[in-house]
Amino acid sequence: MDFSLNDDQRAIEEAIGTICDAYDDNYWLRAENEKRFPQEFVDDLVKAGWMGVTMPQEYGGAGLGITEAAIIIKRISRLGANASSAVHINMFGPHPVVVFGTPEQKARFLPPLIAGKDRTCFGVTEPNVGLDTTHIKTFAERKGDRYVVHGSKVWISTAQIANKILLVTRTTKFEDAKRPTDGLTLFYTDLDRSKVTVREIPKMGRNAVDSNELFIDGLEIPVEDRIGEEGKGFEYLLHGLNPERVLIAGTNIGAGQAVIDKAAQYAKD
């Protein structure tokens, strides 16, 4: 099996490298110390068309695959955890919208996200549950043409700057579902801060990209912001999480390469 990059993939790697080379260690150190989101770096990626790398071309994306996304995130990760964390959600999070969203939803949601006008966060993990998604407690109750949501989320990245959220809730309680994976529903909707309290979690590192607790009290979500069918959110969610695993592998390889490069340079000096 040949794992070498083809000409197009090498061109992508070089193009991303050109953007990354403009942001040196001093830039990332300032962003870390000032707890400042690296907006200039993200803006350059948006201008070059890389933030929607796996999203369809008709909505402004590049229409490429997960291999190309992994190449991009691996190169970005050589800049450090703040760089990769700033762009992860755009590369894997919206994939359930691409696959299961209606044409109207895709036309409404994807172009502003790809263009950098919208910023999103990914609301899955919860206190005392972690990644055991079937046991989440956040609940969305259907009331007419909307859902009303109560619950909490934790370790939600970029919620300080996001205006959108890809949110997973229960619409059937765990004990009432036929299977543990049934009764979960996926939404892509406005992050209404009058109904969602966002509380930043202090960290020892990666401070340029915020991590947060979310407390949801009566968030109203229109039915038209539900992705796919009610109760099938776990199935849809996997279409975001499975690509994420590949991108996380690329992230770790890129970060590991950066550590080796710095250690080698230190030894030479």
Image (cartoon, rainbow, N blue to C red):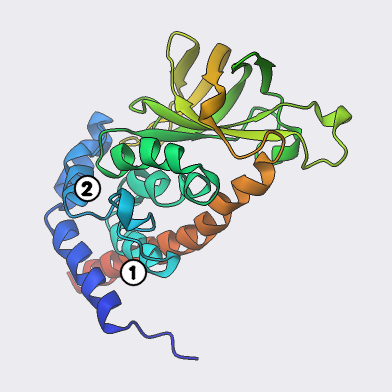
From the viewer's perspective, tell me whether residue 229 is left or right of residue 61. Answer: right
- The front one of 1 and 234 is 234
Residue 52 visible in the snapshot? no
Give the residue drawn at x 43%, y 16%: 192
- Identify which amino acid the numbered label 2 is placed on: Val
Kindly report the distance in space between the C-alpha atoms of the residues bearing marks 2 and 1: 29 Å
Q: Earlier in the sequence, mark 2 or mark 1?
A: 2
Quarter of the rendering occupied by the C terminus: bottom left
Q: Measured along the vertical axis of the image, is residue 172 above or below residue 112?
A: above
From the viewer's perspective, tell me whether residue 161 is left or right of residue 199. Answer: left
Residue 219 visible in the snapshot? yes
Give the residue drawn at x 78%, y 39%: 182
The residue singled out by tag 2 in the image is 46
Indicate the quadrant where residue 245 lies.
bottom right
Q: Measured along the vertical axis of the image, is residue 77 above or below residue 220?
A: below
In x, y percent, where is residue 5?
A: 34, 82
Q: Which mark is residue 107?
A: none
Q: Residues within 10 Å of mark 2 (few under 14, many from 20)?
A: some
In x, y percent, where is residue 252?
A: 44, 61
The secondary element bearing badge 1 is classed as helix
In x, y percent, where is residue 17?
A: 19, 65
In x, y percent, where is residue 28?
A: 22, 45
- Identify which amino acid the numbered label 1 is placed on: Ile
The residue singled out by tag 1 in the image is 260
Indicate the quadrant where residue 3 lies.
bottom left
Query: Viewer-nearest of labels 2 and 1?
Result: 2
From the viewer's perspective, tell me whether residue 33 is left or right of residue 56. Answer: left
The secondary element bearing badge 2 is classed as helix
Give the residue drawn at x 68%, y 33%: 230
- The front one of 11 and 105 is 105
Q: Residues within 10 Å of mark 1 (few under 14, many from 20)?
A: few
Q: How many marks?
A: 2
